[in-house]
Image (cartoon, coloured by chain):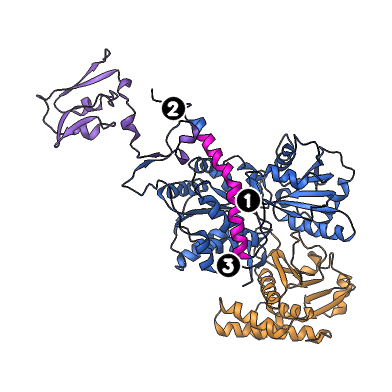
Amino acid sequence: MSQLKTWRELPVGGVIPGGATPEANKTGSWRSERPIWSEEKCIQCLQCWLHCPDDSILIKEEKVTGIDYEHCKGCGVCAGVCPKDAIEMVPERGE
Amino acid sequence: MKKTMTGHKAVAEAMRQIEPDVVAVYPITPQSEIAEYYAQYVHDGLVHTELVPVESEHSAMSACVGAAAAGARVMTATASQGLALMIEVVYIAASMRLPIVMALANRALSGPINIHCDHSDAYLARDAGAVHIFAESAQEAYDWMIMAQRIAEHEKVRLPVVVNLDGFTLTHSVQVVEPLPDEEVKRFVGEFKPLYPLLDVDNPSTWGPFAMPDYYFELKRAQQAGMEEVPAVFLEVQEEYRKLSGRPYRGFFEAYKLDDAERAIVIMGSTAGTAKVVVDELRKQGEKVGLLKVWLWRPFPREEVVKALSHVDRVAVLDRALSFGNMGALYLDITSAFVHQDRRPGFVNYIYGLGGRDTTVDHIHQVFEELESARPGELRYLGLRE
Amino acid sequence: MKEIRWHGRGGQGAKTVSQILAQINLREGKHVQSFPEYGPERSGAPVRAYNRISDEEILIHSGVYHPDISVVIDETLLDSENPTEGLSPKGALLVNTKRSPEEVRKLTGYSGEIICLDADKIAQEAGTGFPNVPMLGATVAVLGTDPKLAEEELKETLSHRLPPEVVEKNLQAFRAGYEAAKGARDVPA
């Protein structure tokens, strides 16, 4: 864990300059199930990317390339919306 | 130029001259005319303010918080139940260090429902983290609104400031007010320099994040540090305003004939004026009486109050609100400031003027008379049918 | 310091003339206060308004309990509102009535100066219908304020909200009220 700041070091009003705190906050460890994406079955409809509440479907040049396991909380929405069962939820058994 | 105007109009005039970017306000007696005047100014094109006619005071303060975080100069006004409804957001505005200036037309809190003046609404907001200033007259309300803007926005402070003016007694009565020229007020308040404005999309920032036990405490301590900066900034702004206006603003409170006083009254708001009349009358009879009128209530100027009152034999502290189950809040402020002093006056607490009960010259005479023999530490009620 | 109490009914303009009087007194260099009896406004209900006029800064912020002048805009309030309550015996009671000062004295038991004028009739003749402005004229007469200066202020303030012909009618009503009060007593202009 990084060193906690003293009260004198905090920006006025508890503002976080630069924003985008979720990036720094790794939530992947919250997962009990992990989505496994199959490139073969995927038709690149991007429904998973549209629905992911944590912005954890990785995209390159408008194509799904994988899943951001540092932030994916394993909610399973992507697997639910996938029309081709290209995402399968499997139990986490530790990394 | 001297003009006749109500306290409402005086506050609205100050707001017009300051011309904030956003005013979010919901009307409530006895504040309504402030909102009405300002809406008229917007309609007439006298100001370029975005007036947000919200559906409640909770929304008013929420809109103020959003607009201030976006980088706007923001003002609002309310009273009594309106403040009670917005209070949770006042705490948030203070914790986000947003320099929102609010006129509070002091009115008794329900129940029973009442529209008249006392300070129970201000007392409700005492610990919210806003700076509190009390005005004695419409002129003072005007002046403090302008000074409040500078205090609130000072880079070291960055806190909401509440300018308290007695409902009806000040808001609805026509008095003589001498406003400053528009351009002088504009120059005095200057440009607002927002910190981390949300509308600066090239430099995004996160406002109002969740704080766990690992950071909440530090953030509150940092907020207190903003409050600790207020006294120095208050004096600096006040001095500049005194030079600009020629009006005698000097210090955190007005010490009226206090230097050699043996008996004194401590009070906030318009009744201070009535008390001055009595001080003058008694002085003419050779009685050594004086008055301390609090301008800056939060943060409370403890050390200066001690200096100003330590030579006095008997002090009556007049609170215009009850703090149920204890002495009045102002009384506790004053007496706790003296707790480590060897030389201290005998203090008596009076609760007065609840729900608009008029406090007359006779009542103030009664206080000075009773002070001679009253038992220190006593809680009394002024103008109450016993 | 002089204190004035106005007695009217909601909608008759007691508060309005109280405020205009404050403007007149400020124009002559006085310190002033004007305030209505605080409360929810109700059309037709008895209302009171007050003025303080002083050569020195007015610090007091309590109500007025011992006025020097009591002005009754609606005579029906003579019974119900006790307009002489606390009124200085060295002061003056101004009443909008067809009755004589003797009758009013009998009715009220007031020992000070009583000035009666038919402000309703004055207002009707002037074409305004509101007795408040003639009563303002009468009050200005009793105070000994320069009527020219008072008229200027009245004209200026009414011009903000009324068309010129209505302003002129009001000025007529004011003058007639002033003259009626002046005629009812010996007041230096």
To which chain does the residue with label 2 belong?
Answer: A
Q: Residues within 10 Å of mark 2 (few under 14, many from 20)?
A: few
Q: Is residue C180 visible?
A: yes
Is-magenta flag for residue B233?
Answer: yes
Query: A73 left or right of B365?
Result: left
Q: CA distance from mark 3 to mark 2?
A: 49 Å
Chain appearing in orange on the rendered image: C
| Three-letter code for the amino acid on which mark 2 is drawn | Leu
- For discs 1 and 2, the disc positioned in front in the rendered view: 2
Question: Is B37 situated left or right of B307 in this image?
Answer: left
Percent x, y of residue A86: 15, 24
Q: Colour of chain A?
A: purple
Residue C56 rendering spot, x and y as whole percentages: 76, 69
Overall secondary structure of the magenta stretch? helix
* Residue occupying the point 52% across, 37% down: B222
Front residue of B311 and C143: B311
Residue at the extreme top of the image, as rendered: A93
Q: Residues within 10 Å of mark 1 (few under 14, many from 20)?
A: many
Binning the other alpha carbons within 10 Å of mark 3 as few (below 14), some (14 to 19) or many (20 upward) gives some
- For badge 1, the amino acid type reads Ile
Q: Which mark is residue A4?
A: 2
Query: Gap between marks 3 and 1, in whole Å?
Result: 20 Å
Is residue B80 in sight in this rendering? no
Q: Which residues are magenta?
A: B219-245
Which residue is label 3 attached to? B180
Disc 1, SS: strand
Q: Is residue B17 above or below residue B356?
A: below
Q: State the residue position of label 1.
A: B133
According to the rendering, which colour does chain B have?
blue
Q: Residue at x 60, y 80 (%)?
A: C156
Residue A28 higher or lower than B270, as above or below: above
Q: C40 above or below B297?
A: below
